[in-house]
Image: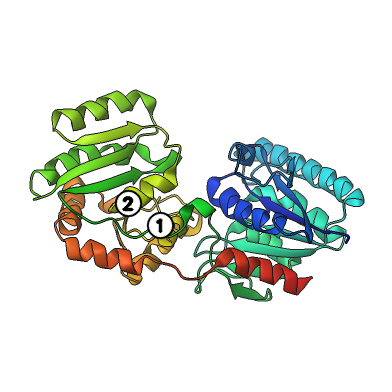
């Protein structure tokens, strides 16, 4: 049987690449499909051993953010992206995909543009609660939009859209909320944009623990390696068991073991919802179209999270919220029960691909 050729493409962040990899792997597990995964140089960093099925062809594409700095920066980005589109055009001349599914980020331009020229069906998946800038441009030649949030904002009116949910990797399957005994475990991850703000949680949690009946254990991601020793010493001097690191190899295990997650609120909110963990969000204020705040608000609305904006972030304000959460076992358990998705997004997306073909 001749296999159906499908391209899965994503921009260069984990929030784009990981959902895309979940769908690519699902397609590749079927004998019906021949799958190619296309991303830019930044996205290639996330494709370590085991992320993608070995059957999947991986291609790096040339492109750059079209909103580059200054006229020269914009011109260079435009030229690089145009070259990437040309390369994808000639690639698809011989390897004719029937469908291209883009997962956002400027890295999807070459594959979606070339795919359209060669007659492929174009689907766009949006991970956030606001339809992204790249997706809004690509929507002018796409066939369908697939949404992670039911009430996604800034949709392009003429484009058919359907709620599918957000695909996540297999390691993020649901795990029962851990029993709270004498210790409450907290996982703090600000990602690469955690900023100095997230470093302050060491001082805040030291003060909070002194007012709780439980002990605290912490896994704390600190992007700046120079701060790791300093923050580790703070926890140690306060008698708090803590693992401080610039990078955690297995984020899924850290989330599963935690009673509370403190983080930004990008597309990774769905990893928390799949595993079923309550969160305290500090949305990145410079996120495009303010999508992180809107993502967080959606989870606050269903009772699965608390949130504080960067403009309101002070040690006093944050301490008050954490005391309310960590001092109320019933409340965090209730939040955990609401932070649980039942929708199978990966299967939903594959069904939509099959429908459009």
Give the image location of residue 343, x and y in percent: 51, 70
- Residue 4 shows in the view: yes
The residue wearing badge 2 is: 261
Q: Name the N-terminal-most of marks 1 and 2.
A: 2
Tell me the element at label 2: strand
Q: In the picture, residue 60 is in which quadrant?
A: top right
Q: What residue is drawn where x is 40% and y is 46%?
A: 253
Give the image location of residue 150, x and y in percent: 51, 74
Task: Return the residue nearer the eye: 204 or 243.
Answer: 243
Q: Is residue 309 left or right of residue 266?
A: left
Task: Return the residue nearer the eye: 307 or 172.
Answer: 172
The residue wearing badge 1 is: 272
| 1 and 2 marks in contact (CB < 8 Å) | yes
Q: Is residue 222 left or right of residue 132?
A: left
Q: What residue is drawn where x is 26% and y is 41%?
A: 218
Q: CA distance from mark 1 to mark 2?
A: 8 Å
- Residue 263 shows in the view: no
Please identify the quadrant where the C terminus is shown: bottom right
Q: What residue is drawn where x is 86% and y is 63%?
A: 119
How many labels were placed on the picture? 2
Q: Is residue 85 left or right of residue 26?
A: right
């Amino acid at each position: 049987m001749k296999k159906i050729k499908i391209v899965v493409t994503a921009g260069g962040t984990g929030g784009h690449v990981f959902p895309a990899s979940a769908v690519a792997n699902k397609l590749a597990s079927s004998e019906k499909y021949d799958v190619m995964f296309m991303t830019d140089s930044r996205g290639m960093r996330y494709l370590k051993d085991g992320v993608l099925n070995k059957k999947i062809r991986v291609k790096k594409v040339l492109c750059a953010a079209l909103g580059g700095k200054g006229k020269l920066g914009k011109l260079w980005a435009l030229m690089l992206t145009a070259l990437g589109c040309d390369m994808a055009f000639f690639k698809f001349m011989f390897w004719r995909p029937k469908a291209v599914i883009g997962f956002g980020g400027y890295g999807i331009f070459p594959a979606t543009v070339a795919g359209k020229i060669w007659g492929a069906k174009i689907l766009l998946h949006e991970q956030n609660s606001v339809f992204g800038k790249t997706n809004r441009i690509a929507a002018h030649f796409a066939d369908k939009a697939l949404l992670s949030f039911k009430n996604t904002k800034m949709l392009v009116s003429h484009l058919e859209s359907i709620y599918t949910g957000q695909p996540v990797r297999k390691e993020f399957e649901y795990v029962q909320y851990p029993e709270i005994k004498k210790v409450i475990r907290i996982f703090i991850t600000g990602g690469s944009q955690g900023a100095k703000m997230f470093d302050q949680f060491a001082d805040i949690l030291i003060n909070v623990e002194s007012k709780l009946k439980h002990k605290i254990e912490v896994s704390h991601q600190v992007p700046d390696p120079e701060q790791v020793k300093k923050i580790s010493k703070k926890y140690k001097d306060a008698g708090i068991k803590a693992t401080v690191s610039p990078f955690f190899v297995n984020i899924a295990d850290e989330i599963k073991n935690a009673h509370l997650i403190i983080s930004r609120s990008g597309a990774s909110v769905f990893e928390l919802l799949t595993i079923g963990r309550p969160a305290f969000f500090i949305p990145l204020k410079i996120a495009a179209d303010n999508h992180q705040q809107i993502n967080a608000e959606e989870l606050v609305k269903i009772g699965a999270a608390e949130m504080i904006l960067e403009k309101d972030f002070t040690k006093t304000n944050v301490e008050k919220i954490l005391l309310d959460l960590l001092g109320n076992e019933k409340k965090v358990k209730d939040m955990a029960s609401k932070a649980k998705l039942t929708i199978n997004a990966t299967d939903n997306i594959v069904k939509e691909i099959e429908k459009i073909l």
